[in-house]
Image: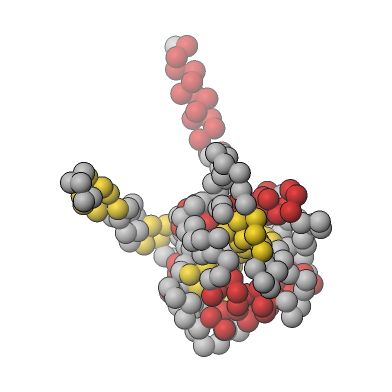
Amino acid sequence: MVSNDDGYNAEGVQALAAALRDIAQVTVVAPEVNHSGASNSLTLNRPLSVRRTPSGDYYLNGTPSDCVHVALTGLLDYRPDLVVSGINNGANLGEDTLYSGTVAAATEGFLFGIPSIAFSLTEKNWPELEAATKIAVQIVQHQLANPFPAPVLLSVNIPPLPEHHWSSLRVTRLGRRHPSQPVIKSTNPAGEPIYWIGMVGEVADFAEDTDFGATSQGLISMTPLQLDLTHYKQLNQARSWVELSNA
C-alpha cells in the first residue's frame, strides 16, 4: 500500500507508485489535498469520503493517518505486506519526523504491525525524482526479499542526485535542530492579528552518524524509528520527585 502527505496527485507518490507496480501489486490510498505537518492526527469530528481516480487510486478528504487507518480497517480486502509513504516533497530530518505527515502514514501502518517505510527527497519540488524513485524501489525490494525479523518503521531521506548506489545508504540516528524561529506576525483585512508559523530552527546536531550529517554529504539516510516515548532514564527521578510530597 502506498500513501503520502502531499496529496494523491503529487509527483512523488505518482512516480513511486508507478515504479513499485513493476515489482508488486500496489494500492494507493492518499489524501485529497496536501497535509504536510499533519503528524499522526486522525479526523474524528466528521465522516470521511473515499473516492477513486480513473486509474483506480483511492483518495480521502482526510489526513495521511486517516488514509492508512481507513485502508487497513475496512477499505482494503487484503492485508498489505508493506506500507510505503512518499516520496515527500522535502526532507524529514531530526524533529521533522514528529510533525511529518509522510512519516505519520508509515507510522500508522507500523501501529497495525505492518513493516512501513517513509521516503523523502531532501529538496523541494522533487529534483532528481527518477533517481530517488529507483533507490526507493531497491530498498522496498530488499525489505520484501529480506524482511526485518519484526515489523520495522524506517524513515529514509534521499539527497537530489542524478544517481544513487546501495553503497551510499547509511543507517543513522535522528539529528536535532535548535528551536524554531519566532512566528511571523501580521494582520488580516479586518485589522485583526494573525500569525504564521516561523521557519524551522538551525541544525544543532549534524554529526556524521545523524540523518543531517549523512544527507549533507550526499548520502542516503535510513533511520529506524520507535514509538515508545518513555524516558527510561528519568523513571527513577520521577519516582523520587513523587515521593517528595510524602517527606
Q: Answer above or below: position of 145 versus 195.
A: below
Q: Report whether residue 106 is seen.
A: no
Position of the C terminus by quadrant: top left
Measuring from the top left, give residue 19's x and y in whole percent.
67, 79
Q: In the image as oriented, which residue stretches furthest toward the top?
A: 246
Quick check: 143 left or right of 10?
right
Measuring from the top left, give residue 212's x and y in whole percent.
45, 67
Q: Which residue is rendered at x = 20% and y = 46% of the image?
A: 190
* Residue in front for this viewpoint, 221 or 48: 48
Q: Which residue is rendered at x = 26% and y = 47% of the image?
A: 194
Q: Which residue is rendered at x = 48% and y = 70% of the image?
A: 89
Q: Answer above or below: position of 174 versus 158.
A: above
Measuring from the top left, give residue 78's x and y in whole percent.
81, 58
Measuring from the top left, give residue 191's x and y in whole percent.
18, 46
* Residue in front for this viewpoint, 225 or 113: 113
Q: In the image as oriented, which residue stretches furthest toward the right?
A: 78
Position of the N terminus by quadrant: bottom right
* Residue in front for this viewpoint, 190 or 237: 190
Q: In the image as oriented, which residue stretches furthest toward the left?
A: 191
Q: Which residue is rendered at x = 77% and y = 62% of the image?
A: 81
Quick check: 35 left or right of 142?
left
Give the number of callouts: 0
Q: Report whether residue 171 is seen.
A: yes
Q: Answer above or below: position of 137 versus 82.
A: below
Quick check: 197 left or right of 138?
left
Q: In the image as oriented, which residue stretches furthest toward the bottom?
A: 162
